[in-house]
Each structure stands twice: as C-alpha cells, then as structure tokens.
Image: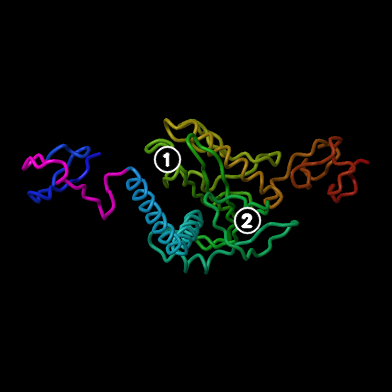
Amino acid sequence: MAKKFICEQCGQTFEAASMPDKCPICGANASKIKEVKSKGVNTNSNVYTVLYASVMVIIVAFLLAFVASALKQTQEANVANDTKGQILSALGYDKATIDVAAVYAEKVQDNVFEAGELKPYDGNFNTTYGGLIKNGELHVFTATTAEGELAYVLPVVGRGLWGGLWGYIAVNETKDKVLGTYFYHESETAGLGARIGEKWFQDQFIGKPIFGAEGEVALTVTKAGAAQSEFEVDGVTGATLTSNGVAAMVKDGLTAYKDFLGGAAAECPSKAGCPNKGMCPNEGGCPDEGGCQGCPKACEQTDVEQ
C-alpha cells in the first residue's frame, strides 16, 4: 500500500511504497524526507470496508424492522378485510362494489362447531389459507346470501400443483346443496391452474348437491368437459393436477364438516325389515350391517322385524 511523504526542501508531497533514497521532485536526500502520518481513516483498508458494510447492514435492518412494525396493524387489517371479502364472494356478493367490512359485520357471524353445536367465536380468523384453525375447532360462518337466504360458509384448504389452495363453500339452510364458492391459490400457473379463482369456474358449483345416496360427499371436479352427473363440475383445461387438488380439497373439506352437515339419509341394508321406504333415518347410514334391527335410530314403526 502506498505511503505519503513530504520533502522539507521543496515542500512537495508524493507517494511511494517505502522511504525513498531521494526526493523524486527536487532530488534532496532522504534526510530531508518525512513520512506524512494519516490523521483520518484509511478508506482503502479492508478493516474500513468490513466496518462500513456492517454498519450499513445494521442501519438498513433496523429501518426495515421499524417499517414492518409500524405497518403491522395495517397489514393485518388488510388481510382480515380480504378474508371477509372472500367469504362474502362465496355468498354471492361482489366485493368490489360493497363496503366489505360493513356488509360482513351485518351479514356474517363467525362460529365454531364444537360438541355438536355452533358457538360464537370471539377470536381472529386470520389464517393465510382459511380452513381449520390450529386447535382443531371447525369454523362455520352463519350468514345471509346476497339473495337473502340463510347459509353456512365452510372454509376448506388443499394442495395444488405448485402450492396451497384454499376456499369457502356456502351451503343452504338444509346443508345439502351449494349456494356459492370462492377458491384461490398460492402459486398456480397463470392462465391454467390459476383459473380456479375465476367466477366461471366457481359458479359451476352453485346448486350442486353435496351428498350421494349413501351419505358420502359426492361433489367433485372432473376432467374439463367430462362432467355428466349432478355431482360433477368441469375442471380447468390443461390444469388437471390443480383441478384434482380442488376436487380433493372439496371432498376432504366437506367430509371434515360431516358431523355438522349431517349428510343425506343412506339406504338401509335391510329394506325388507324397514318400513321407512328403504331409507335408514340414522344420518350417514345404519351403523349395524345387519340392517335396521338394533339401530338406535331405527324406524319408529313397530313392524320393524326384531
């Protein structure tokens, strides 16, 4: 590293790697040359570079932490408002044209389904992808649709091709038919899997029955253009894996709410012994493979064979 020197004879300064034998300007001998000691920081040193970089990193990190802390409440409020808008979308409201917070407060009540009954939930439902909360309680949003119908909104979560899926399914008062849905994704392919967030896809679920003849969740998503039964909706063209993810999310999500939804009456295995038109009154089906005999919810008529 070059050092700075001054010649006392000519008064000129110059730089050299070490003490020169003579002044390169006037030729004076080394006795007239003195090294100039730096009184400031050597900005060319490695130590200076490391210290400068460390100080800048600390300052920037502090500023980012401060900004994040200052904006935390605003960010949380935005997330909560977006979640409310998604729920209202499943109920048929256009979140772009309404005061989301006001309509939500008037039309939606957040509950949890616990021990066979709905109970008001007084916490914050702010999970990123909706669905079940961490302690295993099931959220059920009791609400009024844009058409004025009583509805229950059920959060569901799943997995797509590239990341998480989530959504809300609004069911009717009798809990056997879909009134509306809202689905979205974490990172599905634009123009393909990401189309599950479009209205045309979500509207296909409206009016669809949930349960099959045996009380199982029958609502599903098929290959694009292949939907035939009343329980099927068309998937997205070119996005088979994402469509399959939505199908699994719907089935698993609604199955998780089976105790709340109840399911359709299942066909009784012993039609001959059950006078109730061959249908078991026990929600979800007769628990006894032998038929209605011994069933705690057997047909009330006395002519059931014992």
**Residue 220 image point, x, y percent:** 57, 38
Q: Is residue 44 left or right of residue 68?
A: left
**Residue 177 image point, x, y percent:** 59, 49
The reply to whether the magenta stretch includes residue 216 is no
Query: Which element carries disc 2, helix, strand or loop?
Result: strand
Foreground of the two, 193 or 187: 187
**Residue 10 image point, x, y percent:** 7, 49
Q: Residue at x 49, y 60 (%)?
A: 80
Q: Residue at x 62, y 41 (%)?
A: 252
Q: Amino acid at mark 2?
A: His
Does residue 71 sit above or below 218 in this rendering?
below
**Residue 271 image point, x, y percent:** 81, 37
**Magenta residues, as a range?**
23-45
Q: Estimate how packed mark 1 is, as few (under 14), some (14 to 19) or many (20 or more) residues with alpha carbons within 10 Å.
A: some
**Residue closest to the far right:** 306
Mark 1 sits on what residue?
Answer: 194
Can you say which quadrant of the picture contains the N terminus?
top left
Task: Name the chief secondary structure element in magenta.
Answer: loop
Q: Estimate how packed mark 2 is, as few (under 14), some (14 to 19) or many (20 or more) residues with alpha carbons within 10 Å.
A: many
Q: Amino acid at mark 1?
A: Ala
Tell me if label 2 and label 1 are in contact, CB under 8 Å: no
Tell me which numbered mark, 2 or 1, is placed earlier along the sequence. 2
Mark 2 sits on what residue?
Answer: 139
**3D distance between C-alphas at marks 2 and 1:** 26 Å
